Amino acid sequence: MSKIKNGKYKGETLKDVYLNHRELFANDPHDKFPLLVKINEIQEPGSVQAHPDDAYARKYEKDYGKAEFCLWLDVEEGTKIIRGHSAKTKEEFRKAIEEKAWDTLLIRKPVHANEFVYTPAGTIHGIEGKLMMAEVQQSSDITYCIYDYDRKDANGNMRELHIDQTIKVTNIPHIELDVHPTVTMLEGNEVIEYVNEKYFSVTRYKIQNEI
């Protein structure tokens, strides 16, 4: 993590400032900075995965759960996201995984630049294609993978899968939240609030005039 180059906190990382100056972060109680904010470029299919919620992650992983927001910045034609599944019960979900019935189990949807998606914990998701996205997430390393396209590493080993954990944390049946942006004008500037959820809110300002 890079260090601050100038000003009062010169020489400190954001992690240092968060740990030592909580008054700057509304005295946030988390033991680590609670969000990840990044630009991510995808060049090959991402693994099909789900994240646990806070309760499960704290109990079994000693970490936080993960909700995610993604805004697609640049999307190659034909790219699709995996968003949910068709199973109605845990038994049906497990059977489809064991039979590798990915074409019928996984729900695929086309995506385009400037669209977004909010992914709460427990949602099966993945990407097939190439795109660049802006992401805001809970700060957590807990990812449970059910499918990685049978890819192998340099030693010929396939990626570890987490079938049992994924079945436990996945929303079954899949529930698609009805999330729509709220658009307002502020002094001649367009303000788009994509999400305002428990863990974070994401707002975009399209500046045309001074504000």
Image (spheres, helix red, strand yellow):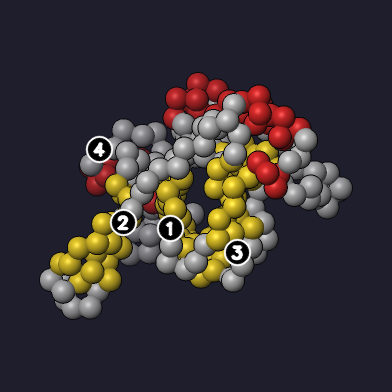
Element marked by disc 4: loop
- Whichever of callouts 2 and 4 sits on the residue coming sooner in the sequence is 4
Q: Residue at x 71, y 34 (%)?
A: 96
Name the residue carrying label 2.
181
Proximity of marks 2 and 1: CB atoms separated by less than 8 Å: yes
Q: CA distance from mark 2 to mark 1?
A: 9 Å
Amino acid at circle 4: Asn
Q: CA distance from mark 3 to mark 2?
A: 22 Å
Q: Nearer the viewer, residue 111 or 24?
A: 111
Name the residue carrying label 4.
27
Q: CA distance from mark 2 to mark 4?
A: 29 Å
The crowd level at tag 4 (other Cα within 10 Å; few <14, some 14-19, many 20+) is few
Amino acid at circle 2: Pro
The crowd level at tag 1 (other Cα within 10 Å; few <14, some 14-19, many 20+) is many
Name the residue carrying label 3.
79
Amino acid at circle 1: Phe
Name the residue carrying label 1.
116
- Whichever of callouts 1 and 4 sits on the residue coming sooner in the sequence is 4
Q: Where's residue 51, x and y in %?
A: 53, 37
Q: Nearer the viewer, residue 111 or 41?
A: 111
Q: Residue at x 59, y 71 (%)?
A: 77
Q: Where's residue 109, x and y in %?
A: 55, 55
Label 2 or label 4, whichever lies nearer to me, is: 2
Visible in this render: residue 182?
yes
